[in-house]
Image (cartoon, rainbow, N blue to C red):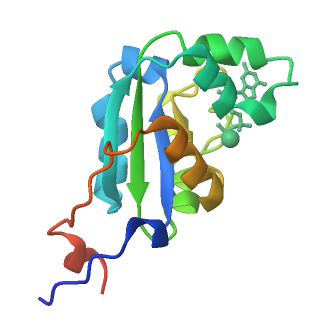
Amino acid sequence: VPRRKIVASSEVEQSYIMIKPDGVQRGLVGEIISRFEKKGFLLKGLKLFQCPKDLAQEHYKDLKDRPFFPKLIDYITSGPVVCMAWEGDGVVASARKLIGATNPLQAEPGTIRGDLAVQTGRNVVHGSDSPDNGKREIALWFKEGELCQWESVQTPWLIE
Ligand code: GDP
Ligand code: MG
């Protein structure tokens, strides 16, 4: 099988996926990572991290005027989160489908939220909503050198 050329990361779509503190506390880390791995996206960054308040506020700045914002910041900073950068063509929209609707009661069975959660305020996982936000969020949550440039041996079996 021919080797594909390694494309510079900035050219490839990336999504910031985060397992929220409830997902970590409930022992769902392996289950959630597994869904993105099995789908066939490429993991470029991964860490367990206690999020400071100012970072949570920056990440969710578009929601700062919503009534639930203080509760959202308390939730996201209430324990460690798992930060991930996933890469691949179409990863942003596909990850949103794998994650399911914001309200887990409305999320389809088979999605992460549809299978594993019951409330919007405890919906176990975050996924970027656009490729631009994917880049912005990965830059916000990861430092220089925390992402790995590597090529999976599976790639030629996933992408023709
Ligand atoms: P997402 O992109 O599906 O995560 O949803 P949004 O970007 O609209 O909201 C971001 C996060 O804020 C959600 O995932 C929830 O954790 C939280 N959130 C949104 N709406 C509500 C709400 O009405 N009540 C509470 N408690 N949290 C909310
Ligand atoms: Mg969102």
Which residue is rendered at x = 60% and y = 15% of the image?
53
**Percent coordinates x, y for residue 29 in the rendering:** 33, 30
Task: State whether residue 99 appears in this view.
Answer: yes
Please identify the quarter of the rendering in which residue 6 is found.
bottom left
Task: State whether residue 111 appears in this view.
Answer: no
**Percent coordinates x, y for residue 83 in the rendering:** 41, 35
Vertical relation: 6 (above or below) 146: below
**Percent coordinates x, y for residue 80 in the rendering:** 41, 17
Which residue is rendered at x = 46% and y = 66% of the image?
10
Question: Taking 12 as reference, is 34 left or right?
Answer: left
- Indicate the quadrant of ligand 2 in the picture: top right
Looking at the rendered structure, the number of numbered marks drawn on it comes to 0
Vertical relation: 140 (above or below) 92: above
Question: Taking 20 as reference, is 4 left or right?
Answer: left
**Percent coordinates x, y for residue 27 in the rendering:** 32, 20
Which residue is rendered at x = 27% and y = 52% of the image?
148
Vertical relation: 113 (above or below) 73: below
The image quadrant where one finds the N terminus is bottom left
Which residue is rendered at x = 23% and y = 73% of the image?
155
